[in-house]
Image: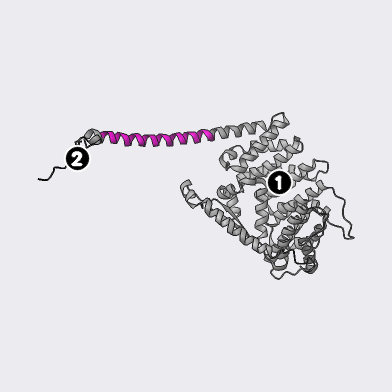
Amino acid sequence: MPRTKKRSGRGGQQGNVQPFSDEDSSIETLSHCSSLSERTSAAEEAGETEEMAQEDFQYKLKVYIDSTVDKSAKTRQGALDGLKTAMATKILYEFISERRMTITDSIERCLKKGKGVEQCAAASLACLLCIQLGSGIESEEVFKTLKPIFKTILNDGAANIQARQACATSLGLCTLVAEDDIMDVYATMECFESLFTHSYVREDGSRPSVNPQTTQLHTNALLSWALLLTICTGSHIRAIVQKHLAKLPRLLENDDVNMRIAAGETIALLFELIRDVDPEFDYDDWEQLCEQLNALATDCNKHRAKTDKRKQRSVFRDVLKAVEEGDFQSETIRFATERMVIDSWVKKRTYDAFREFVGSGMNYHLQANEFIRDVFELGPPMLIDSAALKAMKSSRLERHLYNAAAFKARTKARNKFRDKRVDVGEF
């Protein structure tokens, strides 16, 4: 007779299987409800925390705005720097739009009554304010108030040289963003021309006596002038080429490396613009210019610093290609899930101008600032949640392997031109 199989519980004792009761069901339902309520309350707490953080941030901004009219120069400087950092790293259109005239009045006061560093900070804040407001009536109102002050400081030889340098840069970008009349743009360009042309080498070969600070002022004026070239009409480009293209190479002989680089990039920009207007454009002193650019691209003068020579050679190799072949070394800027290709000297000059003020926040503005996205033809901002963004990011190992492969390929390519056994003269 077969043995009866017994089911035993823990410890070998027999356990009775109880059916699923209504009490157990109610307990499980209560557990689910409790879990759901916990998640809901956590989401509400997160929303409240974010709202409180936003309120605290706006309160700090209001304190900064109020502090820009403080009696203490140190307090005013700190307030200007705080506003600059906020505008460079966040999109604050609604908050700033309501207070734009208050901020403009503070900038005007700091430019007129401040000294040196404070004036520089106020000039930079003016640019960031225009970038936040974008191209429209609001930024035009701001610029109409500040433009006469910029020009007064810029043309005043007795004014602080650092303030004049800052105004030269800020006036250029504010004009690009907020100027509504092309004739006023040309007038501002003439203002810049009256500065940087003083650094031209004279026709008899003599060099003007200019101190380093004034040379930096002329460099800033030249870069702002080149920025405004990007929005000129074709007929004005022709007039500019006829007037300045034969004289700009004289700046390549300047002792300051930043001036030489600015002049080289401006020449490349002019060639790109005039070739778009007139594909058959022919420059009379083309061969002489190419020889001059090639000399700077292979400069080995021992009296110049190594870092200056390295930077100069890198830039002038690209400038030489632009003049000889009409070529541009494209660069890809990645931000979030998007990318932007800088494929022309026009786009490079514009990107560099914005980045000078926005700094490390440039990628964020490319992603979220509608005005900057419109300038670079990126379309409306893309809305991507954090989960999708995380899924699109490559892993740390993938990035490491990619970087290792790129480094190896780059090293192989460079070694072809770095063989020390090759005689320098033969190279």
Which residues fall within the magenta stretch?
26-54
User: For the residue labelled by badge 2, is the local secondary structure a helix, a strand or a loop?
Assistant: loop
Label disc, if present, on residue 170 of the rendered structure: 1
Name the image quarter holding the N terminus: top left
Q: Residues within 10 Å of mark 1 (few under 14, many from 20)?
A: many
Label disc, if present, on residue 139 of the rendered structure: none
Q: Please give the name of the residue rendered at 72% of the width and 35% of the height, measured from the top-left corner.
A: 109
Q: Please give the name of the residue rendered at 67% of the width and 46% of the height, measured from the top-left corner.
A: 357
Would you identify the image quadrant in which residue 340 lies? bottom right
Residue 287 sits inside the magenta stretch: no
Spot occupied by residue 352 in the image (x, y as percentages of width and height): 67, 52
Asked whether, in this view, residue 40 is left or right of residue 257, the answer is: left
Q: Please give the name of the residue rendered at 70% of the width and 34% of the height, measured from the top-left corner.
A: 77
Spot occupied by residue 44 in the image (x, y as percentages of width and height): 43, 35
Q: Is 300 placed above or below 169 here?
A: below
Asked whether, in this view, residue 422 is left or right of residue 338, the answer is: right
Q: Is 340 placed above or below 37 here?
A: below
Let me know if residue 118 appears in the view.
Answer: yes
Label disc, if present, on residue 7 of the rendered structure: 2
Q: Is 295 placed above or below 1 here?
A: below
Residue type at mark 2 is: Arg
Please tell me which residue lies in front, 83 or 40.
40
Spot occupied by residue 165 in the image (x, y as percentages of width and height): 76, 45
- Nearer the N terminus, badge 2 or badge 1? 2
Q: How crowded is mark 2: few (under 14 residues within 10 Å), some or many (20 or more)?
A: few
Residue type at mark 1 is: Ser
